[in-house]
């Protein structure tokens, strides 16, 4: 089963999206957008930038867990991963975004 984006309305009325892998696991989460159109543009930006390894910033949280952010060409963060237990697991997450995001359909749950 291929991955998909889920577009949702948050409890505060703003819009968020999650990229889910084929197994249903969230592999990338967006920031909050005040308008639905902004979230839809964010999804398009993830689809465009996901294949480019240079758009990923590999990071570590303050408690030592690896994670990554995906950035647009202008340097703006367009998605953040979950926290991983190891760098190889984080790198597998990046590969999953590269594989799933470009052609993923969007489920509008708003």
Image (cartoon, rainbow, N blue to C red):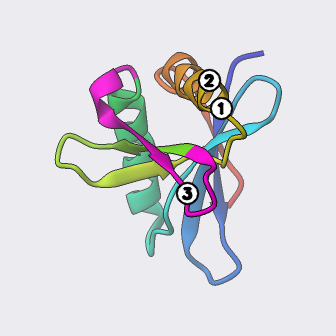
* Of labels 1 and 2, the one closer to you: 2
User: Tags 3 and 1 in contact by the CB under 8 Å rule?
Assistant: no
User: Tags 3 and 2 in contact by the CB under 8 Å rule?
Assistant: no
Vertical side of 64 occupied by 66: above or below: above
Q: Earlier in the sequence, mark 1 or mark 2?
A: 1
* Of labels 3 and 1, the one closer to you: 3
Q: Specify the farthest residue to the left.
A: 74
Q: Which of the 4 image quarters holds residue 104?
A: top right
User: Residue at position x 82%, y 26% from top?
Assistant: 23
Residue 19: where, in percent of width, then height?
A: 62, 39
The span shown in magenta is: 51-66
Secondary structure at badge 3 equals loop
Q: Which of the 4 image quarters holds residue 99?
A: top right
Count residues near mark 3 (Cα–Cα under 10 Å), then give few for <14, some for 14-19, many for 20+.
few
Q: Which mark is on residue 88?
A: 2
Q: Which of the 4 image quarters holds residue 91?
A: top right
Secondary structure at badge 1 equals strand
Q: Quadrant of the C terminus?
A: bottom right
Vertical side of 51 occupied by 43: above or below: below
Distance from Cα at disc 1 to Cα at disc 2: 23 Å
| Residue beneath disc 3 | 61
Vertical side of 33 occupied by 45: above or below: above
Q: Earlier in the sequence, mark 3 or mark 2?
A: 3
Q: Quadrant of the N terminus?
A: top right
Distance from Cα at disc 3 to Cα at disc 1: 26 Å
Q: Which mark is on residue 80?
A: none
Of the pair 51 and 15, the residue shown nearer to us: 51
User: Residue at position x 70%, y 18% from top?
Assistant: 2
| Residue beneath disc 1 | 4
Residue 68: where, in percent of width, then height?
A: 49, 42
């Amino acid at each position: 089963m291929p991955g998909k984006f889920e577009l949702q309305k948050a409890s505060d009325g703003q819009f968020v999206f999650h990229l889910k892998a084929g197994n249903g696991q969230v592999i990338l989460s967006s920031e909050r957008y005040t308008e639905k159109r902004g979230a839809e543009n964010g999804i398009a930006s993830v689809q465009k930038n996901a294949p480019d390894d240079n758009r990923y910033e590999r990071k570590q949280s303050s408690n030592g867990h690896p994670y990554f952010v995906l950035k647009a060409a202008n340097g703006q963060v367009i998605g953040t991963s979950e926290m991983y237990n190891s760098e190889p697991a984080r790198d597998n997450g990046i590969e999953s975004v590269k594989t799933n995001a470009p052609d993923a359909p969007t489920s509008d749950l708003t």
